[in-house]
Image (cartoon, helix red, strand yellow):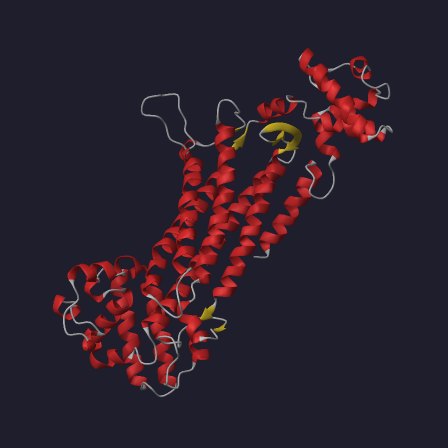
Amino acid sequence: MSQDDSSVKPWGGRFSEATDAFVERFTASVTFDQRLYHHDINGSIAHATMLASVGVLTEDEKNTIISGLEAIRADIDSGNFTWSIALEDVHMNIEAELTKRIGITGKKLHTGRSRNDQVATDIRLYLRDEIDAIALELTRLQGGLVVLAEREAETIMPGFTHLQTAQPVTFGHHLLAWYEMLDRDYGRLVDCRARLNQSPLGAAALAGTTYPINREQTAELMGFAAPTRNSLDSVSDRDFAIEFNAFAALVMTHLSRASEELVLWTSAQFNFIDLPDRFCTGSSIMPQKKNPDVPELVRGKTGRVTGNLISLLTLMKSQPLAYNKDNQEDKEPLFDTVDTIKDCLRAFADMIPALTANKAVMYEAAKRGFSTATDLADYLVRKGIPFRDSHEVVGKSVAYGIQQQKDLSEMSLEELRQFSDVIAEDVFDVLTLEGSVAARDHIGGTAPAQVRKAVARAKDALALR
């Protein structure tokens, strides 16, 4: 593509002077929207096919256009294509090259459409493909969590509230809490895909077109469920991009929460888990360091994805109908979010199945902090003592334990009975960590049996995707 060719604007007939060089660079989007080339060509092929079916193009013209577009695609795929800022965007670059290659027939391709509906179509096609790829990575991560949860169904660890020891739980149960967060995210992603899967092509600039187009045909050719229903909304709607970014911000929030726990658990103070060396880095000055960089970076990248969501919301908040140049600013935050979420999901999906639990350390940590205090209160209630009175009895026994530096399970029967004479030998059945987790044997509970049932349900659900 020569510079002379690229300096001619397809819309230049109304203008009496050339675009200022700075303005040309300032308004161009081809440096980032060229990633849409595959979807732009697919949309153009569908459009040309439809134009031929309604008699606007001949069969020979259609075939010439499609052959030219496929040749351009091959050149772009191989890196043998020169993008021109003077031609502003991916659409005009491809159209100009098509016209250069096949002549006047290339100029007929844009009949009955505008760059407004063209870019709206391209973004939907692009995002639909990316959603499908992200759904696979999300499923892979969930599958890894399920495998690890099954392996650690009986591993006991402290459960926390306020980052203080609360009650013993199983590590498998904790991992399945992450699974549930991601399962809601998957549902939101599927919903987003369903809403964006409509074709704006044919809305033209804003009001539709006078040509006898068949929007149902182009929608079907591109795999959309249906055409969009209002031409003004079709070219100006970016709800689907915002909705995707909202999904991404939330899934990143969930990954960030998990990352925070992984960072804590790998510290010397916790030492609950170990991450393989390939997911960590060292220090340039402290030779003993093994830094959990992958979860730290995922935690950090959450901010940029949330920022991208705010950017898109702010971008759209004051736009009158229909299309405005502002919408060019939708692509960079969207592209960045897609790239970021794919990388973070891949990192987690690779890392999670490879981590190992330090079971003995977790078990000892669960024994500290009087984690079975609630079990003692429940025991007293079953013996006929009102819960509030039981709460007070247990509170006094904990205060005694702090003074004596003894956990409840380490006290003798005589020591426990000084707080309530209904306490009997069977109390030790509930004061053990194993007894505590096993007693919560109901749906959603932390008992190993329930963890295995939850794993089975998750496996069945993942198999249906």
Of the pair 233 and 459, the residue shown nearer to us: 233
**Residue pushed farthest bottom?**
55
- The percent position of residue 95, horizontal first and vertical second, equals 25, 72
How far from the left and from the top, in percent, is residue 250? 50, 48
Q: Is residue 305 left or right of residue 63?
A: right
Name the image quarter holding the C terminus. bottom right
Is residue 355 visible in the rendered structure shown here?
no
Q: Position of residue 109 (x, y in %)?
A: 29, 78
Q: Residue at x 59, y 31 (%)?
A: 162
Relative side of 398 to 213, left or right: right
Q: Quick one: quadrant of the N terminus?
A: bottom left
The total number of labels drawn is 0
Residue located at (39% from left, 55% from top): 334
Residue 77 lies, with reference to residue 442, above or below; the image says below
Using the image as rendered, state which of residue 332 and residue 339 is in the foreground. 332
On the rendered structure, is 46 left or right of 381? Answer: left
User: Can you name the residue that lies furthest to the left here?
Assistant: 4
The image quarter containing residue 133 is bottom left
Rendered view: 54 above or below 248: below
Q: Is residue 41 above or below residue 339?
A: below
- Seen in the picture, residue 134 relative to 322 is either above or below; the reply is above
Q: Residue at x 43, y 32 (%)?
A: 292
Can the viewer see residue 45? yes
Quarter of image, res 51 = bottom left
Residue 428, how many percent across, how many down? 78, 22
